[in-house]
């Protein structure tokens, strides 16, 4: 696989850090059209369950982002949930979605 550009490597690192800090199942980060980044983890409460990517997209939207350039998901799952990719595409139709393992190894790019 080709080497990641520094900005994509950064959002994978942010996603890994968020996941490690909280011990969550998933970590995610997105980058908006201005270069701002939003990192999040999955939420697993009795009354609220959200994927890390959906939380990161929601954070970007609530901060005024109008488009996404890229998203990264760090997980042990072999593929992202299709609804997570849809959430990214709702805000950033052309956004790159990077799927990485917990050690930061890029598995695939959508």
Image: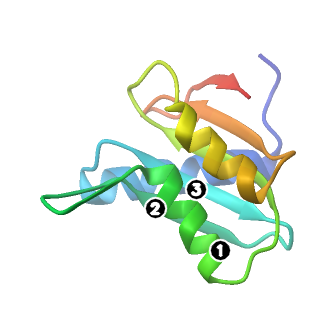
Q: Which mark is residue 110?
A: none
In the depicted structure, whether residue 68 falls above or below residue 83:
below
- Choose the circle earlier in sequence order: 2 or 1: 2
In the image, what residue occupies the spot 67% across and 53% down?
A: 10
- Choose the circle earlier in sequence order: 1 or 3: 3
Query: Mark 1: which secondary structure?
Result: helix
Query: Mark 2: which secondary structure?
Result: strand
Dividing the image into 4 quarters, which one contains the N terminus?
top right
In the image, what residue occupies the spot 60% across and 81% down?
A: 62
Task: Report which residue position mark 3 lands on.
Answer: 29
- Choose the circle earlier in sequence order: 3 or 2: 3
* Residue density around tag 3, few if under 14, some if 14–19, many if 20 or more, within 10 Å: many
In the depicted structure, whether residue 27 falls above or below residue 63:
above
Looking at the picture, tell me which residue is in the foreground, 13 or 27: 27
In the image, what residue occupies the spot 82% across and 64% down?
A: 67
Task: Report which residue position mark 1 lands on.
Answer: 61
Horizontal side of 80 relative to 24 (left or right) equals right
CA–CA distance in space, label 1 to label 3: 13 Å
Q: Which mark is residue 40?
A: 2
Q: Are marks 2 and 1 in contact (CB under 8 Å)?
A: no
CA–CA distance in space, label 2 to label 1: 13 Å
Query: Mark 3: which secondary structure?
Result: strand
Q: Are marks 3 and 2 in contact (CB under 8 Å)?
A: yes
* Residue density around tag 2, few if under 14, some if 14–19, many if 20 or more, within 10 Å: many
Horizontal side of 37 relative to 4 (left or right) equals left
In the image, what residue occupies the spot 62% across and 50% down?
A: 87
Q: Position of residue 50 (x, y in %)?
A: 36, 54
Q: Quadrant of residue 102?
A: top left
In the depicted structure, whether residue 74 falls above or below residue 24:
above
Q: Position of residue 28 (x, y in %)?
A: 51, 51
Which of discs 2 and 1 lies nearer the camera? The answer is 1
Horizontal side of 43 relative to 7 (left or right) equals left
């Amino acid at each position: 696989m080709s080497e990641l550009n520094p900005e994509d490597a950064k959002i994978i690192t942010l996603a890994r850090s968020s996941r490690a800090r909280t011990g969550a199942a998933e970590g995610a980060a997105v980058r908006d059209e201005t270069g701002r980044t939003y990192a999040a983890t999955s939420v697993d409460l009795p009354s609220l369950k959200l994927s890390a990517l959906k939380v990161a997209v929601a954070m970007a939207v609530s901060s005024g982002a109008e488009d996404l350039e890229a998203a990264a998901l760090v997980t042990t799952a072999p593929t992202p949930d299709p609804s997570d990719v849809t959430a990214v595409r709702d805000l950033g139709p052309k956004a790159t979605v990077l799927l990485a393992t917990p050690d930061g190894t890029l598995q695939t790019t959508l």
